Amino acid sequence: MQPSCLLCGRHPHYRHNICQACLLDLPWAQPSIVNQTLGYTYSVCALDYLPPINGLIKQFKHQRNLAAGRLLAFSLSQTISSALLEQQMYRPQLLIPVPLHSTRLRQRGFNQAEFIAQGLSKDLHIPMCKSLCRRLGDQSPLQGQNRRQRLRHMQGVFEVNTKEVSSRLHSIAIIDDVTTTGATAQALSSCLQSAWPGPLHIQLWCLARTPAPKTQLEW
Ligand SMILES: [Zn+2]
């Protein structure tokens, strides 16, 4: 039997647990591509962190609902496929999921960024590498901190495995689930840039972005 849509439960799914009507109805982020000067060239966020996306992300991350995870990864790969097709961005050679600290990985049982990267790798036929970077610290950017404070807080959190560094690799995409200020990706980018022997073009591909703090207060 055809599985039904995870969101409406009424229609048969179109692909990856979502029907076509619900797929169209998702809170797609506009504009999806922002040119950044944060150590990565492009940041692509597929969705806004609004219902039903916030609920799906919570189910995926904290209750290990992998059907929700697959739906979310598919939404991101749809956004990336169109951007690649319209030549808005380069096709990277490798996907790098933001690593989790070993303690957090034990608690959660899986790395949500790695799960998303696996889905993207399958859909877009781009290899993924999870051994290029390691997370040494468990800290994440704190709420209420400005960008500079967040960056200072995140210094030294990541380490690059020098055995995996290759000058033949010059274009990668960092994969993350939710971004607020981009401080995590920025810390990882600068760690990669300083370990790299040649130029490295870095993009950030992210499922969802949270609204600016002002909007959050209004909720
Ligand atoms: Zn539906």
Image (cartoon, rainbow, N blue to C red):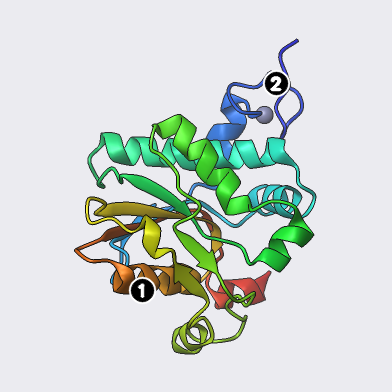
Q: Which mark is residue 190?
A: 1
Q: Callout 2, which amino acid?
A: His
Return the residue nearer the eye: 80 or 19.
Answer: 80
Return the residue nearer the eye: 3 or 122.
Answer: 122
Q: Residue at x 25, y 37 (%)?
A: 86
Residue lying at the far left in this picture: please name it: 198
Which quarter is ligand 1 in?
A: top right
Residue 2 visible to an observer of this rendering: yes
Residue lying at the far front in this picture: please name it: 163
Q: Residue at x 62, y 25 (%)?
A: 19
Image location (x, y in percent) of residue 10 = 75, 23
Q: Is mark 2 within 8 Å of ligand 1?
A: yes
Residue under pointer 2: 11
- Pick the quarter of the image with the C terminus: bottom right
Image location (x, y in percent) of residue 80 = 39, 41
Return the residue nearer the eye: 61 or 51.
Answer: 61
- Please tell me which of labels 2 and 1 falls first in the chain: 2
Return the residue nearer the eye: 165 or 79.
Answer: 165
| CB contact under 8 Å: marks 2 and 1 | no
